[in-house]
Image: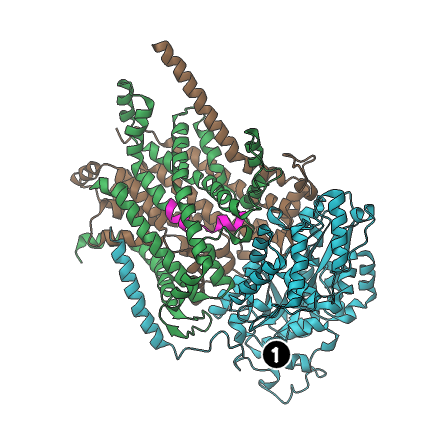
Chain colours: A brown, B cyan, C green
């Protein structure tokens, strides 16, 4: 019986890893292809059948891509915009999610539904009006224009509210008995308990503001204010595009995020002990 | 959940605001179809001291030092050449004019940004634009007729088709700048090997295509721009394409044209670009013998192990070749800025700067005199593409712009693709395309 | 206003201000625009007030096609992505040493830029030498011209979209799995409950809020699909425009045809569709259980 069970367990484990590894290969291949394409010559790129790896890595592609735009400046701008937006998002999201999940006030449900409803309108329709607003505020060509419209997101508020609602109400009531203020309770209990969710929101937001393209292009004019993703179009014209340079620039674009991801993961996730607060 | 209720209340609110907005505004303004621009943008000479500026060409002009912004979509090497020429202007002009180049991404991004800026009343002083982008904000463009008449070194030197294109709204609205044309790129090695000559007529195309198909079992020709090939083929057959009233090719000549095109596709002599995106990729790995595409795309063809040839488009009863590339329009409101911007436009379109631009980028000179400089002649000697473009400069035509023209441009390619997939006959091609075009009005 | 409700709105204030300015206000303008005939965003002129744009919209065969495609897309992508992500997330969570590794790998596609992803996927779908046809070939299936024929445009788009949306769902589910109290599993282990039963009786119900979230957000996102189409088909809506989606249609009408009113009407219709669907979805799933 237990022998049979052990065999079954081994098979299950093998199957599990087979699925995970197969999925991982499929998931990571486009990424590998991106890196390998960034090191190919233009004729290697269109070769039939294609080679997975270039014959001699063309590191010069990176040099050339780097030269095409002031990427160093773009990098600093992207960093500023991403960090400010993400901090803003975290503050507004935690506050709103706490209000929706723990506080009682008239019209709560209506406001919550309204928040959710704002997700349903295609953003493409809002862009021109928002651009006019930015012009009227005289925010053109400033960090404000790239940051402030994005520091509140119904998308994340909805997510965090769901996580906050998972936390047993009894904890809140206990805190109330202890005369713990709402704000203190939010900071001391709710936030640490949902570290992983907050980390997820941070990383999702970092990525979306890191890759934002059209909005930064619209609201900036000078080279000094542009962001990294604006550099990607430098390799496209109406008659063709230099794929190897786009790929090199894309690699330069995503590497910092992967580093940020790994860095944040290490310091945030590993600090969470599963049973700690939940006991 | 009260989503439904909220939906309803938003709607109610909207209606209320709508009424308010209606009150705030004056009567409905002119419709977009009304292309006559308002007299909002005055001719420069009429401003301020009219007497002094009556003949500005010779006398020293009175332009105060100012900054002019120029939005463009030139990337990579194109941008560096433009920057170099602009720097030269900034350093050499006597008025202290400083032109600031602003890269607005690719053409699509520039188009979006111009549209948004027109709505927000924040247009730049100068911008590159295709004519069909301009219809919604035609009344914000500065009329250049007086500038050209009083202060331009020989408008007649500009290639005629460009002049026509830049005045198609009834006034001169732009100065041509980065111009290209569609040419036939071909695999010279392959054609030589099969003993074929470069096709000059439709009949040549069919004969060569058959030979290539028999020998190599690949398509002979492809078209990057399907709307472009329909228009060019009709012109080549002496037929008309479209005007503001509808399709003009529902006749015998139109049927002949589509017989030619449908035969090419149905026999496998021509193919769609499909997943390859641009034919420059397809010809690079020798999967097709030739293709029609923009001369600006020549640098994307990687001819390794074969030799690239470039020729004018094959014709039938006529020769006709599409032009491509943008012109520069002026939006500057302030008369001093207008004068400054005009100084810049004169400079970059001058024979010398134009030659430099054309040699540096592969775009075509807009002036006859630039074609005739020793420098450009030497360039054509070495550059087969430039030579082919020059050869067909007399055959250029441009797509007319009117209210439905954008929709026609986007409908025709998908219609043609469907016809190719269906292996439709010529009559079906004609009927379907006529119907698709007329549905856009 | 009493103190309690004042406090609630105080917490919400930052979000509300931003949303009023950058979402609600432009939304109202879009709704107004949809009732104005021949509206111009440039000079704010219009020729009539009424349902003209809506009439034009429903008479347009491209809009009908886009409605059909978008519906198919939502029905295929959302459930498939959630089920696959759930399985992967649970498997990753059950690993001990390799967990961090797999978590990072499965997250990678999410960070790559849209432009690059589109190019990479065009290569994966290539009919002659693409990876997908290579795999199918292993099972004796003939090469499929994924991006060259109208009939394969939607399947290609759907596969791409499932792949693209999984990274996000896996991330959310993994975060959700952390909140399930360990003692529930410990109790199940003591009772030696079969794994499948643990999955259906503990994991899924405990993850229900995240699953509802993912399906609602996934559905809203799927109805608004645009970038995937644009990047996979290089700015077109597939061969012969046969992969036209609602937002692609709206975008095209707004930015290329300058039919602002029709585009606005299209987004109002899309808004209403999503509103109704979300409503139904919330009724069917989590919300009912809560009460």
Residue C126 placement: quadrant: top right
Position of B401 relative to A202 (above/below): below
Residue C225 part of the magenta-drawn span: yes
- Give the main secondary structure of the magenta stretch: helix
Residue A74 in the figure: left or right of residue C34: right
Q: Is residue C110 visible?
A: yes
- State which quadrant residue A161 falls in: top left
Q: Is residue C250 visible?
A: no
Q: Looking at this view, is B36 or C79 the one in front? A: C79
**Whole-percent x and y of residue B402?**
56, 71
Task: Judge whether B332 appears above or below C179 on screen.
Answer: below
Between A100 and C211, the one lying in front of the other is C211
Residue at the disc numbered 1: B171
The x and y percentages for residue B170 are: 60, 79
Q: Chain of mark 1?
A: B
Number of numbered discs visible in the structure rendering: 1
For the C terminus of chain C, which image quadrant? top left
Left or right side of C90 for B159: right
- Where's the N terminus of chain C, which quadrant? bottom left
Residue range corresponding to the magenta coloring: C218-232
Point out residue B157 in the picture as x, y percentages from the top left corner: 75, 75
**Who's the residue at 77% across and 48% down the image?**
B211
Secondary element under disc 1, as helix, strand or loop, is loop
Q: Is B197 left, or right, of A75 in this rendering?
A: right
Question: What residue is shown at x 27% (from left), y 38% (from top)?
Answer: A166
Q: Position of residue A195 (x, y in %)?
A: 35, 37
Q: Nearer the viewer, residue C239 or B238?
A: B238
Disc 1 crowd, CA 10 A, few/some/many (<14, 14-19, 20+): some
Q: Residue furthest bottom?
A: B51
């Amino acid at each position: 019986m237990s022998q049979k069970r052990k065999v079954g367990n081994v098979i299950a484990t093998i199957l599990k890893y087979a699925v995970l590894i197969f999925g991982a290969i499929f998931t990571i291949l486009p990424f590998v292809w991106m890196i390998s394409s960034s090191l190919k010559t233009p004729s290697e790129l269109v070769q039939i059948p294609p080679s997975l790896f270039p014959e001699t890595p063309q590191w010069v592609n990176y040099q050339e891509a780097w030269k095409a735009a002031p990427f160093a400046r773009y990098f600093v701008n992207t960093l500023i915009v991403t960090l400010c937006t993400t901090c803003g998002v975290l503050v507004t999201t935690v506050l709103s999610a706490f209000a929706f999940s723990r506080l009682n006030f008239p019209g709560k449900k209506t406001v919550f539904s309204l928040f959710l409803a704002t997700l349903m309108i295609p953003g493409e329709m809002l862009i021109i009006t928002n651009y006019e607003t930015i012009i009227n505020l005289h925010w053109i060509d400033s960090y404000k224009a790239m940051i402030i419209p994005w520091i509140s997101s119904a998308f994340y508020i909805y997510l965090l509210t769901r996580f906050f609602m998972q936390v047993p109400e009894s904890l809140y009531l206990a805190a109330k008995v202890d005369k713990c203020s709402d704000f203190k309770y939010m900071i001391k209990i709710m936030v640490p308990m949902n570290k992983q969710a907050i980390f997820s929101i941070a990383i999702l937001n970092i990525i979306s503001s890191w890759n934002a393209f059209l909005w930064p292009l619209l609201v900036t004019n000078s080279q000094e204010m542009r962001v990294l993703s604006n550099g990607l179009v430098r390799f496209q014209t109406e008659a063709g595009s230099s794929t190897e340079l786009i790929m090199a620039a894309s690699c330069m674009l995503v590497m910092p995020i992967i580093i940020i991801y790994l860095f944040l993961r290490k310091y945030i996730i590993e600090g969470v002990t599963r049973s700690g607060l939940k006991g | 959940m009260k989503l439904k209720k909220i939906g309803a209340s938003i709607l109610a609110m909207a209606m209320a605001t709508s009424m308010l907005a209606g009150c705030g505004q004056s009567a409905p303004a002119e419709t977009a179809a009304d292309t006559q621009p308002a007299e909002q943008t005055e001719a420069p000479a009429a401003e301020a001291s009219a007497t002094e500026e009556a003949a500005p060409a010779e006398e020293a002009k009175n332009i105060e030092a100012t900054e002019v912004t120029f939005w463009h979509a030139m990337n990579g090497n194109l941008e560096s050449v433009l920057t170099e020429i602009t720097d030269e202007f900034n350093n050499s002009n006597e008025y202290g004019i400083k032109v600031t180049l602003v890269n607005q991404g690719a053409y699509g991004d520039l188009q979006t940004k111009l549209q948004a800026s027109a709505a927000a009343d924040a247009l730049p002083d100068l911008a590159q634009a295709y004519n069909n982008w301009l219809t919604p904000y035609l009344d914000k463009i500065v009329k250049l007729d007086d500038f050209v008449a009083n202060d331009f070194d020989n408008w007649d030197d500009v290639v005629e088709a460009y002049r026509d294109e830049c005045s198609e709204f009834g006034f001169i609205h732009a100065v041509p700048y980065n111009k290209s044309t569609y040419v036939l790129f071909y695999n010279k090695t392959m054609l030589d090997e099969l003993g074929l000559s470069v096709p000059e007529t439709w009949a040549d195309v069919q004969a060569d295509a058959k030979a290539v198909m028999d020998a190599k079992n690949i398509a002979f020709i492809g078209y990057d721009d399907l709307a472009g090939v329909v228009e060019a083929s009709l012109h080549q057959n002496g037929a008309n394409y479209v005007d503001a009233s509808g399709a003009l090719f529902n006749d015998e000549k139109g049927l002949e044209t589509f017989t030619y095109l449908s035969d090419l596709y149905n026999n496998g002599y021509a193919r769609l670009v499909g997943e390859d995106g641009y034919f420059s990729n397809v010809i690079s790995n020798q999967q097709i013998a030739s293709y029609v595409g923009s001369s600006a795309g020549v640098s994307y063809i990687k001819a390794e192990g074969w030799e690239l040839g470039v020729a004018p488009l094959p014709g039938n009863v006529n020769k006709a070749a599409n032009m491509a590339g943008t012109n520069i329009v002026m939006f500057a409101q302030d008369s001093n800025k207008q004068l400054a911007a005009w100084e810049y436009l004169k400079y970059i379109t001058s024979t010398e700067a134009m030659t430099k631009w054309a040699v540096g980028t592969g775009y075509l000179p807009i002036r006859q005199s630039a074609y005739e400089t020793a420098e450009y002649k030497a360039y054509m000697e070495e550059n087969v593409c430039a030579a082919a473009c020059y050869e067909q400069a007399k055959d250029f035509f441009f797509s007319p712009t009117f209210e439905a023209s954008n929709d026609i441009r986007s409908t025709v390619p998908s219609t043609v693709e469907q016809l190719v997939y269906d292996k439709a006959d010529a009559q079906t091609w004609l009927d379907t395309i006529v119907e698709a075009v007329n549905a856009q009005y | 206003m009493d103190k309690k409700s004042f406090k609630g709105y105080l917490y919400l204030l930052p979000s509300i201000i931003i949303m009023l300015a950058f979402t609600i206000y432009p939304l109202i303008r879009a709704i107004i625009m949809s009732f104005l005939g021949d509206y111009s965003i440039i000079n704010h002129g219009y020729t009539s007030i009424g349902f003209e744009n809506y009439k034009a919209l429903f008479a347009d065969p491209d809009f009908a096609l886009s409605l059909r495609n978008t519906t198919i897309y939502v029905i295929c992508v959302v459930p498939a992505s959630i089920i696959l992500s759930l399985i992967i997330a649970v498997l990753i969570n059950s690993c001990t040493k390799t967990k961090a590794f797999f978590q990072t790998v499965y997250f990678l596609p999410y960070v790559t830029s849209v432009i690059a992803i589109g190019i990479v996927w065009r290569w994966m779908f290539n009919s002659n030498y693409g990876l997908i046809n290579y795999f199918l070939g292993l099972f004796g299936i003939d090469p499929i011209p994924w991006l060259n024929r109208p009939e394969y445009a939607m399947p290609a788009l759907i596969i791409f979209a499932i792949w693209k949306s999984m990274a996000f769902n896996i991330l959310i589910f993994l975060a959700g799995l952390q909140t399930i109290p360990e003692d529930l599993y410990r109790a199940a282990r003591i009772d030696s409950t079969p794994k499948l039963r643990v999955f259906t009786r503990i994991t899924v119900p405990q993850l229900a809020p995240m699953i509802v979230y993912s399906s609602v957000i996934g559905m809203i996102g799927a109805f608004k699909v645009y970038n995937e189409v644009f990047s996979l088909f290089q700015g077109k809506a597939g061969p012969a425009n046969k992969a036209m989606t609602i937002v692609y249609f709206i975008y095209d009408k707004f930015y290329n045809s300058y039919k602002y009113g029709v585009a606005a009407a299209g987004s109002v219709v899309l808004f209403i569709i999503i509103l109704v669907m979300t409503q139904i979805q919330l009724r069917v799933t989590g919300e009912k259980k809560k009460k």
